[in-house]
Amino acid sequence: MTIEEYEIQSEQIADRLMATIEGVDRYQDDIIASQSQFVEDVGHDRQDHPWQYWHWNGTIVLADDAAITPEQAADHMAQLLEDEGWTAREPDLREIVGKYDYDLPSGQDGATWYVGITFRRDEPPAPQKLDVEVVSPSTDSTAADS
């Protein structure tokens, strides 16, 4: 697959995740970054190994009086991923911060998609923050040229 195809799929995954909390009041606009990044292979330069992956990042800050907490928002997203067949890693749940990690095989040489959902358990008025990332499998960036 090309990096452009991974971009489209990353955006679709992110859209489905964000739809699970549509209508939940926000403190501010969501901060979204979506870009390709090079995979730096140790001992080789980019000319020899021009692999890329697509990385989508979202930071959501819920309003103090939102109908759900960041942890509940993360649970909604996690349920969607599980319903779609993603494999959960062991959750990292600490007193203040929690993180859910999910993988989905792409069917290409054991490559996998990754989704990470991190939430904070701060009491208002502290920001009610949730971070989401979607990472595609890597691909040879020259695939589009062939």
Image (spheres, rainbow, N blue to C red):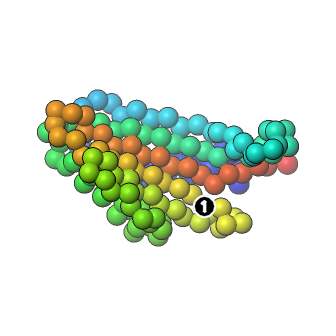
Q: Quadrant of the rendered structure where residue 35 is?
A: top right
| Residue 88 seen in the figure | yes
Query: Could you classify mark 1 by the number of other residues whose Cα lies within 10 Å: few (under 14), some (14-19), or many (20 or more)?
Result: some
Extreme-top residue of the structure = 28
Percent across and percent down for residue 65 are 14, 39
Q: Front-most of 129 and 83?
A: 129
Left or right: residue 63 versus residue 44 is left
| Residue 26 seen in the figure | no
Left or right: residue 9 versus residue 143 is left
Percent across and percent down for residue 57 are 47, 40
Percent across and percent down for residue 71 are 27, 52
Q: Front-most of 83 and 126?
A: 126
Type of amino acid under label 1: Thr
The secondary structure type at the circle numbered 1 is strand
Extreme-left residue of the structure = 65
Left or right: residue 94 versus residue 10 is left
Percent across and percent down for residue 136 are 59, 52
Q: Quadrant of the N terminus?
A: bottom right
Q: Front-most of 47 and 25?
A: 47
Q: Quadrant of the rendered structure where residue 128 is?
A: top left
Give the residue at x 45% y 58%.
101
Which residue, given by chain and number where applicable, does mark 1 sit on?
112
Give the residue at x 16% y 36%.
124
Extreme-front residue of the structure = 95
Give the residue at x 31% y 53%.
94
Number of marks present in the image shown: 1
Give the residue at x 57% y 57%.
113
